[in-house]
Amino acid sequence: MQFIDLKAQYKALKAEIDSSIQSVLNAAQFISGPQVKELEAQLAAFVGRKHCVTCANGTDALQLAFMAAGAGKGDAVFCPDMTFISSTEPSKMFGAASVFCDILPDTYCLSPESLERQIQAVLAEGKLRPKAVVAVDILGNPCGYDALEPICEKYGLTLIEDAAQSFGASYHGKRACAFGHVATTSFFPAKPLGCYGDGGAVFTDDDETAALFRSLCVHGKGPGGKYDNVRVGMNSRLDTLQAAVLLPKLKALGDYEIDRRQEVAGRYNAAFAGKLVTPFVEEGCVSAWAQYALLAKDTAQRDKITAHLTEKGIPNMVYYPKPQHALPVFRDEPRYGETFQNADDYCARTFSLPMHPYLEEAEQQQVIDAVLEALSL
């Protein structure tokens, strides 16, 4: 059994993927081939945004978003305390301060109340300039943008949607990557839409921002091309082979994979209701279920369950064992008295089960039976 079964997905899409890759090999346009432009157009249409610019990976996508926001020394960037480091890494790289905020106890996404408290604390202290907010659609579950967007508008902050885990999800009728001045995603193989290597993309409706991204991705190129460098940029392009892999996968995601993820999550929810804390998805929203994360009663129960699963040969993971404020790299970031109670609680109790659209019911029942068996020990 696989935690995320990319082999099963390839088997289902083999003819389409092989044909798409072969077309790249035949043309030998491995950088900036026509499949890249085609993918960008399809991604923008799928999400409902004016512009999509692909890049080398999801972390680069976030770095591009921070560069567009102009985040740097003296700035405060607000982000959830429970996420992967790539959500906040660019702050450190560009000299800005990462100001962590607690998460909500149900969706595990950025808490609007904690965010506003932290913004007001930064303003009261007067040492940093509030600059941007990174809203992470954690585990594939979209953030509460109806609450976050007004806060960003109130304080003049750039909203960045980190949809690395949520491509294919939706929030009240709008798909992930449709929120914020800039949205970012990752095509790491294990993501809901993954390539066969690294890849990422940024989305925006602003023409100037899109043009900036295209410049930054190719060494700060200007109107005259890659030898007309008008700014310091980076080398961050999605190669044509990865675009060729993503094109048939994008179709499958929209046609049936997101629906199948709902079916898998639904069976898990029904099996574990009342026994463990099952994931919460707000009404009117659809999670991409990048991970299916349960909460145990406490760390001891979590460790007992995961040990039993491992003994039974069932893969399991902990997303994430430490909140951001507990990582050594962020020990010197400003705190402002926030306790991060929900983030600490989540990290102490969470564990994740196999989740992908090709998980057979019989396999899922094995997982369910093993978890329930562990609870009875």
Image (tube, rainbow, N blue to C red):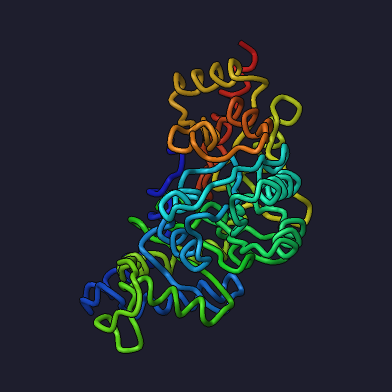
Q: From where the camera sits, is residue 260 visible?
A: no
Work out whether residue 220 or residue 186 is closer to the camera in this orientation and state it: 220
Residue at 59% x, 45% y: name it.
Answer: 99
Q: Would residue 168 be found to the left or right of residue 68 on screen? A: right
Whole-percent x, y for residue 238 in the image: 35, 67
Work out whether residue 133 or residue 175 is closer to the camera in this orientation and state it: 133
Q: Would residue 13 be found to the left or right of residue 161 on screen? A: left
Work out whether residue 265 or residue 120 is closer to the camera in this orientation and state it: 120
Which residue is most to the front? 126
Q: Would residue 337 be found to the left or right of residue 222 on screen? A: right
Whole-percent x, y for residue 159 in the image: 62, 62
Rendered position, 39 above or below 371? below
Which residue is most to the top? 377
Work out whether residue 89 or residue 42 is closer to the camera in this orientation and state it: 89
Which residue is most to the bottom? 224
Whole-percent x, y for residue 130 in the image: 62, 56
Rendered position, 92 above or below 228? above
Point out the image quarter for the N terminus. Answer: top left
Whole-percent x, y for residue 70 in the image: 50, 65
Q: From where the camera sits, is residue 75 visible?
A: yes
Count of marks, rendered view: 0
Point out the image quarter for the C terminus. Answer: top right
Residue at 65% x, 28% y: name it.
Answer: 345
Q: Would residue 377 be found to the left or right of residue 226 on screen? A: right
